[in-house]
């Protein structure tokens, strides 16, 4: 039977969600009352902390500034309506899955907007995320939003987010409205990220140039388009020499890095087979596949064989758990890691939380 003190404490937690989402307390308390016991994940008889680096949310106030509306159920994308955090509901879902901490990110939907709008919306996003993380530091961390179409502004936003708000890095798309990250115009942003030790979490936004071919059954704009977007982004960062220029960059990509780790060795042969297709003024310091060892990837690859292969290509030290919550791509992400027999107990514990804690500077 819960004590009165515990009930008041839990109600206060629910109230924290009010400031973040604008929901009423009565909306939060029923979810709190129905919450299931918190799952504690064990590896080899020891408690393993689970840190999910791929968890989404939105702040409705910022969306309003940008002239956008939050989709409500029923929607074409399951889970979309739960992007605005109702604290009790979010914590309940995390507890059920065995997620101790979510590193929240907001998918960039502002790369084509005007500077004054972007500046205001991102301030709301970053301060809202910081407020939630400050109130619940044991359950949430976050990646900042950046107005990358204005690199000078993005530099200021990243520095403020890291130094003043305590955010862990920034969530970025796969390109900036079609402009590749390897473009020199973005070098000041990567230089600042390297200086600050910021983690850059790449989450794709499909590949709009292929919209016509994605038509038809299967939601191909996301199913194929998202992993392809990440594959292109990472390939440009490698081949254009961006990772040589900024070797200290901490880059983590969603969905297991797209298709690149699945067929990376082809990249090692491209400039030999077709010298005309490569820039003679760019001499990479390593083979293209070797750069994968300095990048990070989430575990959202669905099968044990896919996770085994990802680990073989990039190393288990480079993999962190990702759920895509609240979008239900994989609601058994913890079991996916635990059930991959090719991983040792130490490797499972590292993927579940140890790698992310080290990467993000989170104490566990």
Image (tube, rainbow, N blue to C red):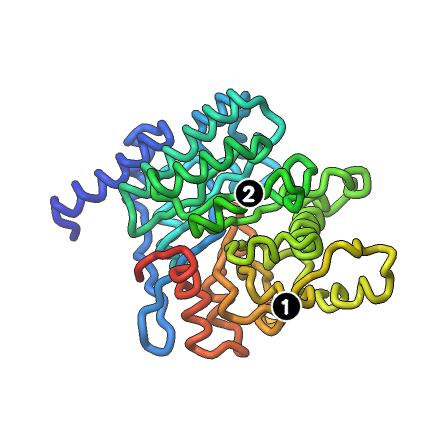
Taking the view exactly as shown, the residue that stands out farthest to the left is 4
Quadrant position of residue 104: top left
Taking the view exactly as shown, the residue that stands out farthest to the front is 281
Q: Horizontally, is 337 left or right of 136 in the view?
A: right
Label 2 or label 1, whichever comes before in sequence order: 2
For mark 1, does the 10 Å Cα neighbourhood hold few (<14), some (14 to 19), or many (20 or more) residues? some
Please identify, in this view, whether the residue under mark 2 or under mark 1 is nearer the observer.
1
Note whether 187 is above or below 262 in the view shown: above
Note whether 292 is above or below 93 in the view shown: below
Q: Which of 171 and 71 is in front in this view?
A: 171
Give the position of the C terminus as an image quadrant: bottom left
Residue 148: which disc?
Answer: none
Q: Nearer the viewer, residue 273 or 42?
A: 273
Q: Horizontally, is 164 left or right of 198 in the view?
A: left
Dot 1 falls on a residue whose secondary structure is helix
Note whether 304 is above or below 110 in the view shown: below
The location of residue 226, given as percent across then percent down, is: 66, 48
Quadrant position of residue 267: bottom right
- The residue at which mark 2 appears reads as 172
The location of residue 347, given as percent across then percent down, is: 46, 74
Q: Residue at x 40, y 55 (%)?
A: 360
Q: Nearer the viewer, residue 45 or 290?
A: 290
The location of residue 302, given as percent across then percent down, is: 59, 62
Dot 2 falls on a residue whose secondary structure is strand
Q: Which of 237 and 139 is in front in this view?
A: 237
- The residue at which mark 1 appears reads as 290
> How far apart are the alpha carbons under marks 2 and 1?
23 Å
- Can see residue 223? no
The location of residue 86, given as percent across then percent down, is: 37, 37
């Amino acid at each position: 039977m819960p004590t009165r003190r515990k009930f008041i404490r839990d109600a206060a937690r629910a109230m924290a969600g009010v400031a973040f989402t604008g929901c009423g307390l009565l909306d939060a308390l029923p979810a709190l009352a129905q919450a299931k016991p918190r799952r504690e994940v064990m590896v080899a008889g020891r408690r393993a902390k689970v840190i999910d680096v791929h968890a989404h949310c939105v702040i409705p106030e910022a969306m309003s500034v940008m002239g956008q509306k939050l989709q409500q159920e029923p929607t074409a994308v399951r889970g979309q309506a739960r992007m605005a955090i109702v604290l009790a509901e979010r914590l309940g879902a995390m507890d059920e899955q065995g997620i101790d901490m979510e590193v929240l990110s907001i998918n960039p939907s502002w790369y084509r907007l005007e500077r004054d709008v972007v500046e205001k919306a991102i301030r709301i996003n970053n301060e809202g995320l910081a407020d939630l993380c400050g109130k619940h530091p044991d359950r949430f961390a976050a990646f900042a939003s950046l107005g990358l179409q204005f690199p000078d502004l993005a530099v200021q936003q990243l520095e403020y987010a890291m130094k003043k708000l305590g955010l862990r890095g920034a969530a970025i798309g796969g390109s900036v409205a079609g402009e590749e990250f390897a473009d020199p115009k973005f070098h000041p942003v990567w230089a600042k990220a390297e200086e600050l030790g910021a983690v850059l979490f790449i989450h794709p936004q499909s590949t709009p140039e292929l919209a016509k071919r994605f038509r038809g059954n299967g939601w191909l704009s996301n199913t194929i388009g998202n992993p392809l977007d990440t594959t292109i982004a990472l390939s440009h960062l490698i081949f254009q020499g961006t990772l040589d220029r900024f070797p200290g960059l901490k880059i983590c990509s969603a969905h297991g890095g797209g298709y690149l780790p699945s067929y990376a060795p082809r990249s090692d042969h491209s400039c030999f087979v077709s010298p005309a297709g490569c820039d003679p003024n760019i001499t990479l310091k390593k083979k293209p596949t070797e750069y994968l060892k300095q990048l990070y990837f989430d575990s959202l690859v669905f099968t044990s064989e896919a996770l085994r292969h990802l680990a073989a290509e990039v190393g288990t030290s480079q993999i962190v758990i990702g759920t895509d919550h609240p979008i239900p791509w994989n609601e058994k992400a913890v079991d996916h890691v635990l059930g991959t027999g090719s991983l040792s107990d130490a490797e499972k514990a590292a993927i579940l939380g140890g790698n992310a804690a080290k990467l993000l500077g989170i104490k566990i």
